[in-house]
Amino acid sequence: MTSTDENRPARPAGRPRSAKAEKAIIEATLDLISESAGISELSIEAVAARAGVGKTTIYRRWSSKEDLVVDALAVLKAPLPPISGRSVREDLITYLEVMRREAGDVRSRCVMNIAMNESERHPRLVERIRQATVGPRQEALRALLRRGVDTGELRADLDLPIAMAMVVGTVMWYAKSAGLGEAGADGGALPETLAERLADHILAGLTPR
Amino acid sequence: MTSTDENRPARPAGRPRSAKAEKAIIEATLDLISESAGISELSIEAVAARAGVGKTTIYRRWSSKEDLVVDALAVLKAPLPPISGRSVREDLITYLEVMRREAGDVRSRCVMNIAMNESERHPRLVERIRQATVGPRQEALRALLRRGVDTGELRADLDLPIAMAMVVGTVMWYAKSAGLGEAGADGGALPETLAERLADHILAGLTPR
DNA sequence: GCGTTGCGAAACGGTTGCGTATCGGAAGGT
DNA sequence: ACCTTCCGATACGCAACCGTTTCGCAACGC
């Protein structure tokens, strides 16, 4: 054994793979996914062209389109929002604010689109997205609401699935309809005060107190 | 002018087009749309095969895929729910109940999917859907909420876009997550009491009264 | 029953993307 | 320097669909 010959799986001789090419491929993949609705429309050839790379270089690293997409989306896994724990209202606003910001980001949006629409065609991929992104956030929100019920900040007869749908569904739908209706130049940025106003309406409801 | 020669565009001689074939094509189109996410994956050849029809028969009637889809979706134009006008709560439940039922119908669901995801690729088609289906319902809901503010049934400082997103987004998201999480055998039917419970949470909010 | 038109089936050439193979050259290890 | 491996480019055969054309038969009006 030489000093460099650790028990690692044999350092390959020859030219190492270009990290730059790999990054370019991932970037191109993310771009194209967010441009095209659905990963079925994503073509390896288009990725290669966009990345300025030969198809060989892609197939040398990923054996299928799905593998490539999995790795590409893994780059996006945004960290969970830090929950202060001071009050349900405050934490809810934090949570909604993260969603508001992400709703303005094309790449984050496409993750949700894929998770919602391709669940039957690519169950493995969607399952992976669920575990990496959707699941933890759902858990965080569920815990937040449960805590609220325990502390009395939220009504005792709260229907948890409905409450969760209210939080997530409202902001998602607001983002959707704002984007559809106006098609603003910024491409979907939402007003800064949105999180607070949403939290207000969700917590207090639509009727007068 | 003979007795049959009205100023109609000349009764065509020869074998008339088969209404049965036309219906089979529409049905096959709707089936395939609801199976495949996105109309890009819809192929005329698949429609012809599913309908038991030659491609010729399709192209004789519709000049493009988009025209076919427009006509197919026109079949689905569900009537607006009748609004009793007795109380906001009652009308809201009526509205939500319609959405609940439609969320359990594969074909109705795909209309929303198309409207949300293909707006850039098929703007003409989406615009048509908006005018025929989404628009009127949005208007009905908006009027319902406005009326509630006027009568004092709803809070005076109601944020209309947010309130609308709460109603529609919550039920849509609930349907989505219920379908994703469980993948029940019925394919998405939602509990019968859902509309009322949703209305309760939306109107009263998540906090104790 | 005759003429006209629709029908399903099949085949066409064209396009796109797949996944593989081959090439000359470039880039690093040692 | 040398050897190994990666690089981008290009071409291949294969498959799916496109939109069109041709074919022989079926159906309906007159």
Image (cartoon, coloured by chain):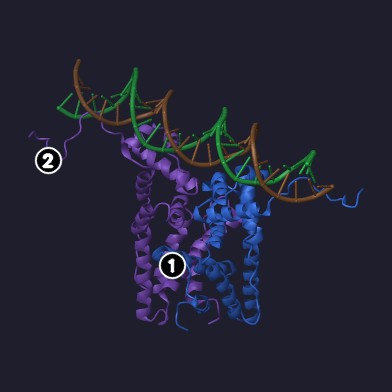
Chain colours: A purple, B blue, C green, D brown
Q: Are marks 2 and 1 on the same chain?
A: no
Nearer the camera: disc 2 or disc 1: 1
The single residue placed furthest to the right in the displayed view is B1
In the picture shown, does residue B7 fall above or below B80?
A: above
Count of numbered circles on the image: 2
**In the figure, residue B183 lies in which quadrant?**
bottom left
Rendered location of residue D3, percent (x, y):
19, 22
Between A71 and A200, the one nearer to me in the picture: A71
Task: Rate crowding at label 1 as few (under 14), some (14 to 19) or many (20 or more) other CA atoms within 10 Å.
Answer: some
Q: In this orientation, does residue A169 appear?
A: yes
Rendered location of residue A11, percent (x, y):
18, 35
- Secondary structure of the residue carrying tag 1 is helix
Relative horizontal placement of residue D30, taking residue A70 as reference (left or right): right
Q: Residue at x 43, y 52 (%)?
A: A121
Q: Which mark is residue A98?
A: none
Q: Which mark is residue A7?
A: 2
| Cα–Cα gap, marks 2 and 1 | 49 Å
Q: In this orientation, does residue B162 appear?
A: no
Chain to which mark 2 belongs: A
Relative horizontal placement of residue B147, taking residue B111 as reference (left or right): right
- Residues at discs 2 and 1 in contact (Cβ within 8 Å): no
* Three-letter amino acid code of the residue under disc 1: Ala
Relative horizontal placement of residue A4, taking residue A21 as reference (left or right): left
- Secondary structure of the residue carrying tag 2 is loop
Q: Residue at x 57, y 53 (%)?
A: B28
* Three-letter amino acid code of the residue under disc 2: Asn
Residue denoted by label 1 = B178
Between B79 and B20, the one nearer to me in the picture: B20
Task: Rate crowding at label 2 as few (under 14), some (14 to 19) or many (20 or more) other CA atoms within 10 Å.
Answer: few
